[in-house]
Amino acid sequence: MAKVVVGATPFQGHVSPVLTVAADLVRRGHEVVVYTGSRFEERALAIGARFQALPPEADLDDRNLNTLFPARATLPPGPAQLSFDFENFFLGQLPAQVRGLRALLATFPADVVLGELGFWSIPVLNLSTAREERPTLVTLGTVPLLIQSEDTPPFGAGMLPGPGEEARAGNRAMNAEVRQVFADLQRFGEATLTSLGVTLPDYLFDTPFRRTDHYLQLTVPSFEYPRNDLPEHLRFVGTLPPASSSDYTEPEWWSELSGGRPVVVVTQGTVANTDLNELVIPTVRALADLDVLVVAATVRDDGPDLVRQALTDVPDNVRLAGFVPFDRLLPHADALVTNGGYGGVQTALHYGVPLVVAGASEDKPEVAARVEWSGTGVNLRTSTPGTTELRAAVQAVLHDPGYRSQAGIMAKEIGQHDPFDAIAEIVDASGGSR
């Protein structure tokens, strides 16, 4: 059996996938230490892993980032906010993160260090330590591929790729422009790694893809744009299955999910659900008089009350909920309206559920673009759609069989992959190698 350190930036969306992987490795008998923010200690111990908190200066809490960093709230989504996040959260905390990891490895000589894309200690170890003197490094791709390619437009704007040499030439030019946009951040990254005794040899955003031993993208090839220039150690391993929820108590209205009406689920996910007026409430309004059952999964204890407060009357066809496990709900769904969280979209496709996507922050425009490109749903190209646009998009997804057909094809492809086996194969091969 192997010794494995599982690391993550201490944010909910970064930690959840690696905890899912860590739980499977524990079940297989490996010795696992979870290395992330202290607020996740209880969850790590619950899966049978050991836990090591990040050093205090790196132990952030994404639930109050705008309070801790008020300047962030003034920045629009895009390059300015992304640069701020990297300078303050990813690269800014990196020296402490690396220091803590090296101290952990001194007492727990791991065979494998596994982390998500934002866990920058992996490229630092790759660049600073000879292969025979360090653990095997495994990076999980939990957002769409953002490595630059001549086959795709730059990551961020949600642009679809075009065919032919003219499109590739345009991509090369746009990629160069983006590197100029982030020139200051590139210099910040170079200085940060220099302080750790490492030279940064790549474009900053390409580094986590190139400086690891195994990059495992958590989706299937059909959900990603074709590229001819990906690193050889990058492969698609399929989506993580939704967490089991055997202890969930079904609400009184659960039987209505099988009542014959199309079921439309709307959610803003687990992170970007601060303002339910962005998507949940407009969707409820947009579908109020349609012959559908709307389940508003707010993923907040106070979510149902917030929706009630925003509406004069809750429509008769709407059922309000806080957290509803997707492994129980989505098998009943005919459409999912979402702001485009990568994990939630992958879970919908796991069940063959077509999508309506409305998202503008973080990686969400890129997720929405891939939904559009793959034919598995409608991309509304905004995070604040109006009721007219939402109503038309949901009706299109429900009544055009092409969307469900494409989502079903994607589900079959997902069923042919097992990311747990792919990860375990690497871990097994690395066990006791040091």
Image (cartoon, helix red, strand yellow):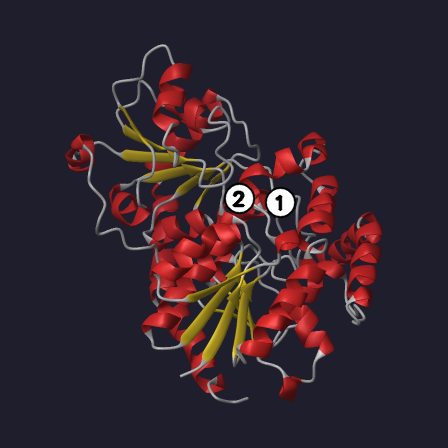
Q: Amino acid at mark 1?
A: Gly
Q: Which mark is residue 290?
A: none
Q: Is residue 126 above or below residue 382?
A: below
Left or right: 196 as drawn, with respect to 115? right
Left or right: 231 as drawn, with respect to 270? right
Q: Residues within 10 Å of mark 1 (few under 14, many from 20)?
A: some
426 or 392: nearer the viewer: 426
Residues under numbered marks 2 and 1 in contact, where contact means CB atoms less than 8 Å apart: yes
Q: Amino acid at mark 2?
A: Ala
Residue drawn at x 69%, y 52% as measured from the top left: 153
Mark positioned earlier in the residue sequence (2 or 1): 1
Across and down, in percent, residue 260 comes to: 17, 34
How far, Cα to Cα, is label 2 from label 1? 7 Å
At mark 1, the secondary structure is loop
Across and down, in percent, residue 421 comes to: 38, 74
Q: Is residue 24 above or below residue 408?
A: below
Q: Residue furthest top?
A: 312
Across and down, in percent, residue 149 comes to: 69, 62
Q: Quadrant of the N terminus?
A: bottom left
Across and down, in percent, residue 83 comes to: 74, 46
Q: Is residue 241 above or below residue 263?
A: below
At mark 2, the secondary structure is helix
224 or 22: nearer the viewer: 22
265 or 20: nearer the viewer: 20
The answer to whether any part of residue 229 appears in the image is no
378 or 110: nearer the viewer: 110
Q: What residue would you read off at disc 1?
A: 158
Labels in figure, total: 2
Residue drawn at x 35%, y 66% as measured from the top left: 48
Q: What residue would you read off at disc 2?
A: 368
Q: Residues within 10 Å of mark 2 (few under 14, many from 20)?
A: many
